[in-house]
Amino acid sequence: MAETEVFSQQRVGSAYSYNELRGRERVIYLSTPKTSKAVWLTSLGPKLEWGNQEMMWPVTDAALKAEPTERLEQLATPKKNFRTPTDYKKAIHVYSCGRQSVIWDVSPMAKKAEASGRVATLSKYKTPPTSYQEDRAKHAFSCGRQSPVWDVSDGAKSARERVRLDGLARAKTPHRDYVPPREVESMVSGNAKNAVASTRLETLARPKSRPEGPFRDPIWPVSPLAKSINASSRQLELAKPKGIPDGYQSNRFVINDVSRSARKAIATTRTQELSRPIMRATMDHVQFNPDAFIVSDAAKKARCPARIEELAQPLKR
């Protein structure tokens, strides 16, 4: 918790970017609770402290003495519990998928019962086929690989040790500068438990007292000396507003008053002609020609010249 508070203060004081955080710093950033930015100038309503059972507004006497209607009593009625008393007496209960455990006590009659022929047939385990031959006696059914456990040969048992094997068999040692992680719970020494805080520590441990605002009224009386004072020439010069340059024209209003002569004016013939919109036919009507595929009589009686007949002859290959 202390580490989180220190990191939060460092984050507020420095120009940290959320995208630059990685690893543990990002986890601490995300786990830091959001601080309240409300102050006495911006807070509205009563002062609330979250986490308690106090109400935001006090309950009126009329609400305390009011009688509920039939509809409220109907809605306030709790749901009926359909569980039987025997459901609470099950000692073995497994919370799996919201269901009760399928393990229950076996009745004495079930222990003395004899299985039927069908049950006995279903309880038999599956036997391998007659042509099956097991070629690997020590086989672990894991990814189809042979078991890593095998018998050690006599030659391996009586083999001599070598320097290289001793070096490979030696466990890796940690670095000389390695410091093991500290325990989460630190042991407080006896001297620290019996220590007495000094006057300076008690002074620093006291919280800073701040008076609750507002500190003064927004309207305060003006002293008679301030009322009777005369401004100097420099103050009068600085108090003059910024003037408008010569030739400045203010903005025109969006809505202009229409003159009486413009209201009674009559448009000329040329103005009326120019104000008429251009009527253009659509492309469907422009390109539509009902006689597009009708052969004219002149085309029927025409004779092809010799050049066209020569061009119309097919190529001989």
Image (cartoon, rainbow, N blue to C red):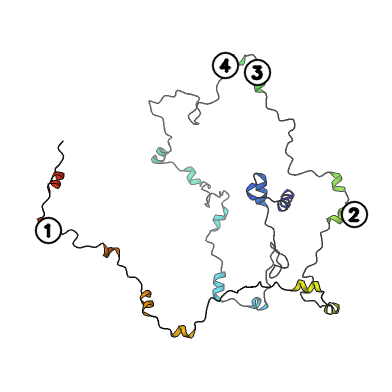
Q: Give the spatial CA distance, label 2 vs label 3.
A: 66 Å
In percent of width and height, residue 266 lies at 40, 83
Under circle 2, the secondary element is helix
Under circle 1, the secondary element is helix
| Closer mark to the observer between disc 3 and disc 1 | 1
Instruction: Report the residue at 85% width, 47% height from top.
Output: 193
In percent of width and height, residue 235 lies at 79, 72
Dot 4: few (<14), some (14–19), or many (≥20) neighbours within 10 Å?
Answer: few
Give the mark nearer the N terminus: 2 vs 3: 3
Give the mark nearer the N terminus: 3 vs 1: 3
Q: Give the spatial CA distance, label 1 vs label 2.
A: 128 Å
> Residue under circle 3?
164
Dot 1: few (<14), some (14–19), or many (≥20) neighbours within 10 Å?
Answer: few
Give the mark nearer the N terminus: 4 vs 1: 4
**In this picture, residue 8 sits left or right of residue 276:** right
Q: Nearer the viewer, residue 108 or 204?
A: 204
Q: Is residue 216 visible?
A: no
- Is residue 312 depicted above or below 240 in this figure? above
Amino acid type, residue under disc 4 in the picture: Ser
> Residue under circle 4?
153
> Residue under circle 1?
298
Instruction: Report the residue at 15% width, 47% height from top.
Output: 308
> Residue under circle 2?
199
| Closer mark to the observer between disc 4 and disc 1 | 1
**In this picture, residue 302 sits left or right of residue 190:** left
